[in-house]
Image (spheres, helix red, strand yellow):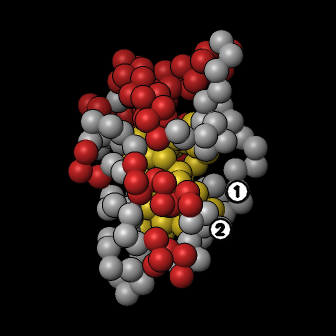
Amino acid sequence: MRGLDTTENLTYQINYLTDKKIDFVGRYVNLSSAWKRLGTLEAEKLSSAGISIFPIFELNPTSGDYFSRERGVRDYDESLASIAAYKIPSSAVMFYTVDYDAPPEDIPKIIDYFSAIVESARLRRANGYDYPGVGAYGSGYVLGEILARWPVITWLSMSSGWRGYEDWRSHADVLQSVGDSSSFDFDYDISDKNYGYGGKKC
């Protein structure tokens, strides 16, 4: 399947997307970051055109200082509000990101963060509520550490210099790459689904 992710509003780009046979788009849904978040009209138009949305929750996860168990709880709670606001279906995957080349010493903090998210999602389902699957974006190294603990959906960053890129390039569920500037008149990255999600759900 062919897709893209972008920080830009796609409300008036639907024809471009359908002409290029885009199946899905990754858009940011955190309500506290207005400049790049998905718009309500945008979501309606994408849905009407048959283009799936894969939601991305990202504030500023660019160093180890961002990550903690407490931060994971807060981000999960805000993502719940996003799910309600955008009517995101339980069949979707909510991606939480690690947007830097995390070194080994940061892994414990990142694991604490994802532990809080996964446990919160599982507890919610145990109490009778459904919830989109949990996805992780980052380097191959980070994805491997997370996947060793939970069956998350993996989205590999296009940053080929980051740890573990080559090892994970053919294994990630979603692979990000640099977009062709001649294809669309907005900034974007290509995101291809390698194998589909295979029914995995934390």
Q: Tag 1's secondary structure?
A: loop
Residue 131, picture quadrant: top right
Q: In the current view of this chain or complex, which residue is farthest to the top?
A: 127
Residue ID at (48%, 54%): 44
Residue ID at (48%, 32%): 84
**Image position, residue 110 (x, y; %):** 42, 32
The mark that comes first in sequence, 2 or 1, is 2
Q: Tag 2's secondary structure?
A: loop
Residue ID at (61%, 44%): 92
Closer-to-camera residue (172/21): 21
Look at the numbered discs 2 and 1 and tell me whether their residues touch, using CB distance below 8 Å. yes
Q: Mark 2 — residue?
A: 1
Q: What residue type is labelled 1?
A: Gly
Q: In the current view of this chain or complex, which residue is farthest to the bottom?
A: 182
Q: Mark 1 — residue?
A: 196
In-image side of 202 versus 115 (left or right)? right
Closer-to-camera residue (94/38): 38
Q: Distance between the residues labelled 2 and 1?
A: 8 Å
Residue 19's tag is: none
Residue ID at (42%, 84%): 183
